[in-house]
């Protein structure tokens, strides 16, 4: 079941990216991330820190 969920998620992600690249005013300007790699790196760090804090405070503390 998990592999099917990943496959569906990947398909939806590809569809979203294609839609955003074709849109005149995209919700998330993906081309900006390619233009400014420093901004992309900061956003990746932000996402990783949030995942880490989620894992520490909400998942690991259940035990």
Image (spheres, helix red, strand yellow):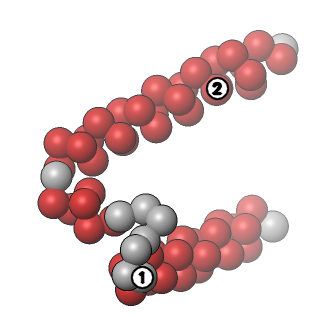
**Residue farthest to the front?**
25
**Splitting the image into 4 quarters, where does residue 48 fall?**
top left
Q: CA distance from mark 1 to mark 2?
A: 35 Å
Q: Are marks 1 and 2 in contact (CB under 8 Å)?
A: no
Quadrant of image for the N terminus: bottom right
The residue depicted at 46 percent of the width and 37 percent of the height is: 47
Residue 13 percent location from the top left of the image? 54, 71
- Could you say whether the residue bearing mark 2 is in a helix, strand or loop? helix
Residue 14 visible to the viewer = no
In the figure, residue 51 lies in which quadrant?
Answer: top right
Instruction: Find residue 52 and report its horizontal and vertical position in percent.
Output: 54, 26
13 vs 25, left or right, is: right
Which mark is on residue 3?
A: none
Task: For the C terminus, give its image quadrant.
Answer: top right
Sequence order check: which comes first, mark 1 or mark 2? Answer: 1
Label 2 belongs to which residue?
A: 55
Q: Classify 38 as above or below 3.
A: above
The residue carrying pointer 2 sits among few (fewer than 14), some (14 to 19) or many (20 or more) residues within 10 Å by Cα, namely few
Label 1 neighbourhood size at 10 Å, few (<14), some (14-19), many (20+)? Answer: few
- Asked which secondary structure carries label 1, the reply is loop
Residue drawn at 37 percent across, 81 percent down: 24
Which residue is labeled 1 in the image?
A: 23
In the image: residue 40, left or right of residue 46: left
Q: Is residue 8 above or below residue 39?
A: below
Vertical order, 42 against 11 (above or below): above
Looking at the image, residue 11 sits to the left or right of residue 38; the answer is right
- Identify the residue shown where x is 69% and y is 16%: 57
């Amino acid at each position: 079941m998990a592999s099917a969920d990943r496959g569906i998620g990947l398909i939806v992600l590809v569809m979203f990216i294609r839609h955003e690249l074709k849109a005149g005013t995209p919700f998330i300007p993906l081309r900006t991330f390619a233009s400014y790699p420093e901004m992309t790196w900061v956003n990746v760090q932000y996402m990783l820190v949030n995942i880490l804090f989620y894992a520490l405070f909400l998942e690991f503390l259940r035990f």
